[in-house]
Image (cartoon, rainbow, N blue to C red):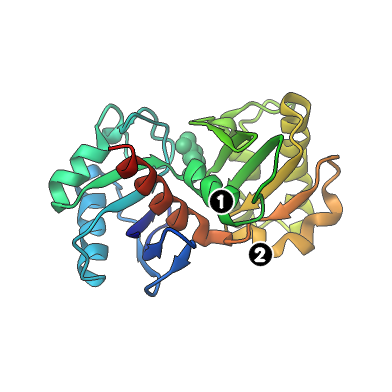
Amino acid sequence: MKILGIDVGGAGIKGAVIETTTGELLSERIRIESPRPATPEAVGITVQALIDQHHWSGPIGIGFPAAIQHGVARTAANIDPAFIGLPVADYFSRQTGCPVQVANDADVAGLAEMRFGAAKDTAGVVLVVTIGTGLGTALFSDGHLLPNTELGHIMLDNGLVAERYASEAVRDTQQLKWKDWGDRLNRYLVTMEKLFWPDLIVLGGGASKKLHKFAPRITVQAPVVPARFLNLAGMIGAALFAEEKLGAG
Ligand code: BGC
């Protein structure tokens, strides 16, 4: 099935038409800067621009940077607080006239990696961490997702919230060297390992391309691998999620 997959991020909103049977991109990936402030109306306008640029009129899946409970946003760490309590799937469906399904961005990136990517056919516990403006997490047990694990907000043993200490945005603004930031990410991953004992950790987001630069600082026992789809995983997974929901009626 062909679905327009959209990844709403703190910095950019990206979209591409995805073939859900293979995870392939059938169109070019288009990226538009995230509006500031990222209010529902402003994000809606950007989503519509992506639809127009793709000449799209079919189903849409959106990965969104918030806990999404049955289509309703429950948090808004890196997006306008006006989203909290908003039925985002219905809101974007009405605004665009296309059937829209919405889920947490890290959860859908995880779906893409479980189905076609770095965690394909992996039994046991898989933790996917997406590194961007925030730290997103997706947790799987034998391929089943526990949705909306907001583990980027966990407090570390230094008293700091993980995503305010080890995100890509923090590396950027504090101009941290890869090895120094690697130590920070490691502190986070060690904390995750002590709590969840994953069999595999998959890192997504822009930094996953640079794993070789900080891999020597990572001391967890679980293998740590880059996401196969790197920062495309959100768009691909958003389309997979929408297909699942459409199939379920
Ligand atoms: C949000 C999560 C999101 C993550 C990555 C966090 O700040 O709370 O819902 O998955 O950022 O975008």
Between 207 and 164, the one lying in front of the other is 207
- The quadrant holding residue 246 is top left
Residue 4 horizontal/vertical position (percent): 32, 60
Rounded to the nearest angstrom, the CA distance separating label 2 from label 1 is 20 Å
Question: Which of pointers 2 and 1 indicates the residue nearer the eye?
Answer: 1
Q: Quadrant of residue 125?
A: top right
SS under mark 2 = helix
| Residue drawn at 76 percent across, 32 percent down | 193
Residue at image mark 1 = 115
Q: Left or right: where does residue 186 sit relative to residue 88?
A: right
| Above-or-below relation of 30 to 23 | below
Label 2: few (<14), some or many (≥20) within 10 Å?
some
Residue 64 is left or right of residue 179, and the answer is: left
Residue drawn where x is 69% and y is 44% of the image? 122
Displayed quadrant of residue 2: bottom left
Seen as rendered, the residue at the extreme bottom is 28
Is residue 29 visible in the rendered image? The answer is yes
Q: Amino acid at mark 2?
A: Lys
Judging from the image, what secondary structure is the residue with disc 1 in?
helix
Is residue 183 shown above or below 85?
below
Q: Position of residue 189 (x, y in %)?
A: 74, 38
Per the image, the residue denoted by label 2 is 209
Instruction: Please name the amino acid that badge 1 sits on.
Output: Arg
